Image (cartoon, rainbow, N blue to C red):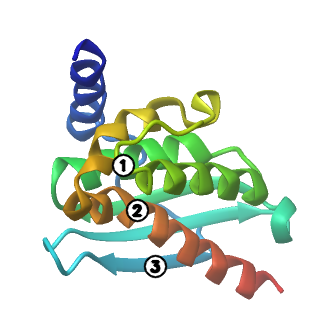
């Protein structure tokens, strides 16, 4: 139970003190996603340097409104992937998706890769909340695909 309380505190801290919030320029890709189930929304921008899977995520910025889970997830995601190559960032996203699909079961995760994102383990028990946690991640994938499409 102590671990779950610590995870809740990590989520609340990212919600109260969001990282990378506020749309910034320059950017090559932008995506707007809405979770129709609860009304959470995010507009996310991606700035890449380089090309293809070796491009580096130079910046991620977003403007969002919604529950603490969706807001905190956007903060954690942006902090985790800025500075990584697109390929590495996609691997982090895949690992987070595995966590969200675990339904609270014990799965082998790379906690070093996920860092603060492991705090969302409890969220995976609640199917209605999984979309909240994944909203920013899906917006990032779309914005990155757009950025890579413009670069080619």
Query: Which residue, given by chain and number where applicable, does mark 1 sit on?
Result: 73
Query: Tag 1 or tag 2, which sits nearer the N-term?
Result: 1
Instruction: Tell me, yes or no, whether the two marked residues, 2 and 1, touch with CB atoms within 8 Å.
Output: yes
Judge by depth and name the residue closer to the eye, 105 or 23: 105
For residue 5, what is the image quadrant?
Answer: top left
Q: Nearer the viewer, mark 3 or mark 2?
A: 2
Please give left or right for residue 116 compared with residue 130 in the image.
Answer: right
| First along the sequence among labels 3 and 2 | 3
Quadrant position of the C terminus in the picture: bottom right
Residue 141 higher or lower than 91, as above or below? below
Element type at mark 1:
helix
Q: Are marks 1 and 3 in contact (CB under 8 Å)?
A: no
147 up-or-down from 90: above or below: below
- Which element type, helix, strand or loop, lies under badge 2? helix
In the rendering, which numbered label is found on residue 136?
2
Between the C-alphas of marks 1 and 3, the distance is 16 Å
């Amino acid at each position: 139970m102590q671990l779950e309380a610590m995870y809740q505190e990590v989520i609340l801290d990212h919600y109260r003190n969001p990282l990378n919030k506020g749309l910034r320029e320059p950017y090559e890709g932008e995506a707007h996603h809405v979770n129709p189930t609860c009304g959470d929304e995010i507009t996310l921008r991606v700035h890449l340097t380089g090309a293809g899977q070796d491009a580096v995520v130079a910046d991620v910025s977003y403007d969002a409104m919604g529950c603490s889970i969706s807001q905190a997830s956007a903060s954690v995601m942006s902090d985790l992937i800025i500075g990584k190559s697109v390929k590495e960032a996609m691997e982090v996203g895949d690992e987070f998706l595995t966590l969200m699909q675990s339904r609270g079961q014990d799965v082998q995760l790379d906690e070093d890769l996920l860092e603060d994102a492991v705090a969302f383990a409890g969220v995976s028990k609640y199917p209605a909340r999984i979309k909240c946690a994944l909203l920013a991640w899906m917006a990032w994938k779309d914005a990155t695909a757009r950025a890579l499409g413009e670069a080619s």
